[in-house]
Image (spheres, grey):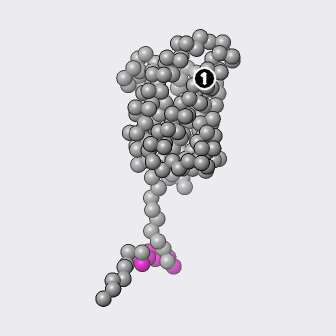
Amino acid sequence: MLFSGVRLFAVGYLLLFLQIHEYLPFGKQGIRPDLLLIFVLYNALHCSALLAVIIGFVAGYMCELFSATNAGLYITIYIAAIFVAKALQKYFDFDSIRNCFCLLLVCLFVKLFILSFCFLFVYEYNFLLSETVWLYESIFTAALFPGVYYLVTVLLKKQREPHVVFGAPSHAHSITRRPF
């Protein structure tokens, strides 16, 4: 359990580092892919709801620490994405990469809705500039989604435990009977 927690933290920190790195394409203009959203969606689909919300909260908090956003914005976006993923998981099967990509697109529109509400009503900010940045970030995130999702899947894949019978490994699952 401790090793999987360390692995979760390490993968999240790696994606955060890649997300805030300024030498990515378009990084100098402030256009960066939301790699932590992909990480949060993976955990929303493969973890319990409580663990996914904790991961989303920590990922949003860490993203806000290293970016110049207002407090609570990314936390709200990531937790809303988790709620959308958990609600849609009851009705759809997210075993294929195509369905996960569609879920990412839905969550990017949820992000747009939250950003537009916050910028127009809460922060009284000109949203037209940030709308174009959101569009470029969303295209960049969607383009990197298959590779990042595969990377997260490989790095967080659970190891299969060997079958144990009375304290000794059992090899009964590998023995097959052959008819004469």
Q: Residue at x 42, y 75 (%)?
A: 173
* Magenta stretch bounds: 166-172
Q: Quadrant of the rendered structure where residue 143 is?
A: top left
Q: Residue at x 62, y 12 (%)?
A: 125
Q: How many marks?
A: 1
- Residue extending farthest to the front is 91
The N terminus sits in image quarter: bottom right
Q: In the rendered view, would you say 28 is above or below 144?
A: above
- Residue 159 spot, x, y in % from top left: 44, 58
Q: Quadrant of the rendered structure where residue 139 is?
A: top left
- Residue 12 spot, x, y in % from top left: 49, 39
- Residue 176 spot, x, y in % from top left: 37, 79
Q: Residue at x 61, y 49 (%)?
A: 90
In-image side of 160 versus 82 (left or right)? left
Q: Is residue 53 magenta?
A: no
The C terminus sits in image quarter: bottom left
> What crowding class fits label 1: few (fewer than 14 Cα within 10 Å), some (14-19), or many (20 or more)?
many
Q: Which residue is nearer to you in this view: 152 or 10?
A: 152
- Residue extending farthest to the left is 180
Q: Residue at x 43, y 16 (%)?
A: 29
Q: Which residue is nearer to you in this view: 114 or 165?
A: 114
The reply to whether residue 20 is in sight is no
Q: Quadrant of the rendered structure where residue 58 is?
A: top right
In-image side of 139 versus 72 (left or right)? left
Q: Secondary structure at mark 1?
A: helix
Residue highlighted by disc 1: 115
Q: Which residue type carries mark 1?
A: Leu
